[in-house]
């Protein structure tokens, strides 16, 4: 069938398998162009492996370090004339390319928050790899069913205390307007968001993997966080999601204790703001990203998820002297180029000036829009979208 983008707000309801394949190939080519990562990981579990930072982590490990990878994600194959999800096509593309390169790659599709998917993953590691030496935790989800209590939590994206008013953009139309977001009404909203996006599930994973004996001596685990500029603090770092990120960052201490006898270490890496399915859902942030992209592209410091993850592996987690550079709070920072003073000063200057009229000139809204469609396999250079596409793509390791 001919597959075209169909959007509803910040969601794209369709995805293009050939575009996804080309996008994955482009990421692989980038990683290869950077050369092999010395002392890199060899057996890697990526939780949240189908899109965004998780997919790029998997590609960086496989093609930068010849790692065997197991990817866990929650995606849908095509069924009855309905397209599969972008993450499904990405994962099919990844496995295809990994297998062609002689690399082990298998995937598990289901709810990573559940005990059942953890058990399936452990069984697969035991059967095929024995142990893993890196666990990447890259889930982004609006809800979580707690595996022990069955309680279903929904996260919210809200400020805490005061209402927050700032500019935001509809990236489809380029209209800039003011938005006011009311603060949480009760502590429960905060607790629910922590339950979904905080560190508990990461801890459950590491506990289960350790108890099953599938973590190698010297194992590393990393989860991803965000800080960003002051202008997004009320909605991000000081908002409900920020409380969840604080909780995730605190989990590092707990996991380091847990991993001590294995000589293992856990890290949180603070990543750059990028266009992903998750970040496009946050108000204000897409406008910030479109200004940030413009400034960083002009300075030649712009990165996408694959550049970030390649740099995380080669320049932070697996450095030649084995040292992992951390900030004063013990976090890895690959948001360093985003947070550079000159970059932030320029973004702040543009922020004051940005209106619907000035947007096309002073922002990279066009780049934002294109990258959004790229996430779903659309507008990828070199792909023939007039050609019939087969939406029934299989992920080789999934029946
Ligand atoms: P994404 O939406 O592209 O990826 C989310 C992944 O989680 C997908 O593989 C999806 O299948 C998987 N997933 C979601 N719910 C699941 C479930 N119940 N079971 C199994 N898999 C499930 O998100 P993105 O942006 O790559 O986010 C990953 C992490 O990076 C998050 O912790 C996010 O906060 C963080 N981060 C994101 C930034 C951004 O600007 N996008 C910046 C800094 C950090
Ligand atoms: Na991800």
Image (cartoon, rainbow, N blue to C red):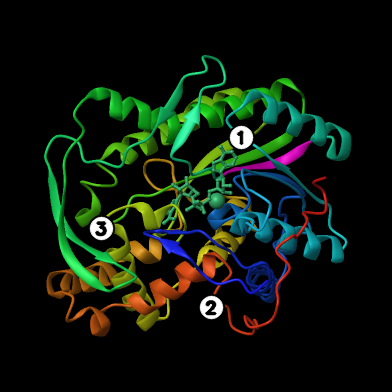
Residue 185 in percent (x, y) is at 18, 29
| Quadrant into which the N terminus falls | bottom right
Question: What is the quadrant of residue 393 in the picture?
Answer: bottom right
Mark 2 and mark 1: Cα distance apart in space: 30 Å
Residue 328 in percent (x, y) is at 36, 44
Q: Nearer the viewer, residue 316 or 210?
A: 210
Residue 259 in sight: no
Residue 66 higher or lower than 246, as above or below: below
Mark 1 lies on a secondary structure that is: loop
Residue 379 bears which disc, if any? 2
Q: Around disc 2, counting alpha carbons within 10 Å, would you say few (fewer than 14), some (14 to 19), or many (20 or more)?
A: some
Q: Which residue is mark 1?
A: 111
Residue 284 bears which disc, if any? 3
Rendered residue at 43%/41% (across/down)? 330
Within the magenta stretch, is there residue 116? no
Mark 2 or 1, nearer chain start: 1
| Quadrant into which the C terminus falls | top right
Mark 2 lies on a secondary structure that is: loop
Residue 130 bears which disc, if any? none
Residue 40 in percent (x, y) is at 71, 54
Mark 1 and mark 3: Cα distance apart in space: 29 Å
Q: Is mark 2 within 8 Å of ligand 1?
A: no
Mark 2 or 3, nearer chain start: 3
The region drawn magenta spans 131-137
């Amino acid at each position: 069938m001919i597959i075209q983008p169909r959007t509803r707000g910040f969601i794209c309801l369709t995805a293009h398998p050939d575009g996804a394949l080309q996008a994955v190939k482009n990421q692989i080519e980038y990683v290869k162009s950077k050369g092999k990562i010395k002392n890199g990981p060899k057996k890697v579990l990526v939780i949240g492996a189908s899109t965004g930072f998780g997919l790029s982590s998997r590609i960086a490990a496989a093609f930068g370090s010849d790692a065997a990878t197991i990817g866990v994600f929650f995606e849908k194959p095509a069924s009855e004339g309905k397209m599969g999800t972008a993450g499904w096509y990405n994962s099919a593309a990844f496995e295809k390319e990994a297998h062609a390169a002689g690399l082990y790659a298998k995937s598990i599709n289901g709810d990573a928050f559940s005990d059942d998917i953890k058990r399936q993953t452990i069984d697969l590691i035991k059967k095929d790899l024995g142990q893993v030496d890196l666990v990447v935790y890259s889930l982004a989800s609006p809800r979580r069913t707690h595996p022990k209590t069955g309680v279903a939590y929904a996260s919210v994206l809200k400020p805490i205390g005061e209402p927050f008013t700032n500019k935001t953009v509809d990236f489809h139309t380029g209209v800039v307007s003011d938005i006011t977001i009311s603060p949480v009404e009760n502590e429960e909203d905060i607790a629910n968001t922590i339950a979904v996006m905080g560190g508990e599930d990461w801890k459950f994973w590491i506990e289960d993997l350790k108890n099953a004996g599938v973590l190698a001596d010297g194992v590393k685990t990393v989860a991803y966080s965000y800080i960003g500029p002051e202008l997004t603090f009320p909605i991000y770092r000081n908002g409900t999601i920020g409380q969840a990120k604080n909780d995730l960052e605190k989990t590092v201490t707990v996991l380091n204790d847990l991993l001590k006898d294995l000589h293992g270490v856990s890290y949180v890496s603070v990543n750059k703001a990028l266009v992903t399915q998750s970040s496009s859902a946050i108000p204000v942030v897409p406008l910030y990203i479109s200004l940030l992209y413009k400034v960083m592209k002009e300075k030649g410091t712009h990165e996408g998820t694959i550049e970030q993850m390649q740099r995380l592996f080669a320049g932070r987690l697996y450095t030649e002297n084995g040292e992992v550079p951390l900030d004063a709070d013990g976090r890895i920072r690959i948001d360093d180029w985003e947070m550079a003073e000159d970059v932030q000063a320029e973004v702040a200057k543009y922020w004051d000036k940005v209106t619907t009229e000035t947007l096309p000139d002073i922002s990279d809204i066009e780049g934002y829009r294109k990258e959004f469609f790229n996430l779903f396999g659309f507008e990828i250079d070199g792909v023939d979208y007039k050609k019939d596409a087969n939406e029934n793509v299989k992920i080789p390791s999934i029946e």
